[in-house]
Amino acid sequence: MVNQQDPRVLRTRQLIRESFRALLRSKGFDSITINDIAQRATINRATFYAHYEDKYALLEEITEQAFREMTPKEVMDAHELTGEICDQLILLTYRYIIDFYQLCRMDSKSMAAIVDDKIKKMLQQTIVSILVKGDTLYRADHDDTELVSAMTGAAIYGAALHWLTVGKMDRTDLLLNIVRPYVMNGLKLYRNQDSNPMSY
């Protein structure tokens, strides 16, 4: 079993991730082989497999790591999903998508599906964390909180991806002005319905 805290292990994993990122910029995901990654990282295939099951596991890890590194401290420490925190989540998601879709060659449907799914899950986890820290309503019903967070994350992700595809990259102010009220009003509606069951 590999000791994940060993400095040599950390260095090798870093080399693997950097090599993979470099290959993503120059080659399509589907055409990248384990040999390609190992050669670029100056390791052998056995060493690669000692750290990662396959290139899909590696992609998931770098997707998650990059998302965490880009997440502002204010979002990580937030105890309430305010309009300001909502704006930061929208911008974080939008900038993250731009990084992946412009810096990497996203010509692989399998890669796009993995990245999309991972970002949505990371968003959901971040939103759950914020909601349960500051509101007894969300702490009381885990299933409802997961669902509300999944819907909120999907709305933010879908809007950010659409904004990129329609080419309005320089108008993040418009993106925020459209998505923020949608998200905040949805959360407000849920809270109001939960506190007044007869409104269903």
Image: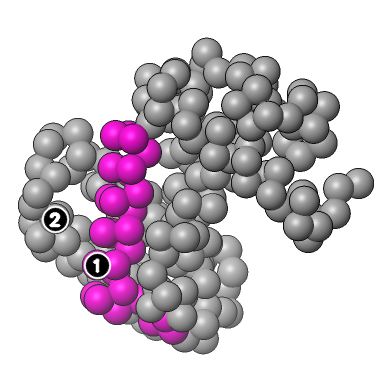
Quadrant in which the C terminus appears: bottom left
Q: Position of residue 169 (x, y in %)?
A: 14, 45
Q: Which residues are magenta?
A: 78-103
Is residue 186 at least partly visible in the picture? no
Between 108 and 154, the one lying in front of the other is 108
Residue 107 drawn above or below residue 69: above
Q: Is residue 40 rendered to the left or right of residue 121?
A: right
Q: Is residue 83 magenta?
A: yes
Residue 175 drawn above or below residue 62: below
Is residue 62 at least partly visible in the picture? yes
Q: Main secondary structure of the magenta part?
A: helix
Q: Position of residue 32 (x, y in %)?
A: 55, 18
Closer to the N terminus: mark 2 or mark 1?
A: 1
What residue is rendered at 37% in x and 38% in y? 100
What residue is rendered at 71% in x and 52% in y? 10
Please, which colouring scheme is shown?
A: one colour
Which residue matches tag 2?
172
| Amino acid type at mark 2 | Thr
Which residue matches tag 1?
87
Residue 78 drawn above or below residue 32: below
| Amino acid type at mark 1 | Asp
**Dot 1, how many residues are within 10 Å of its Cα: few (below 14), some (14-19), or many (20+)?**
many
**Dot 2, how many residues are within 10 Å of its Cα: few (below 14), some (14-19), or many (20+)?**
some
What residue is rendered at 50% in x and 45% in y? 63
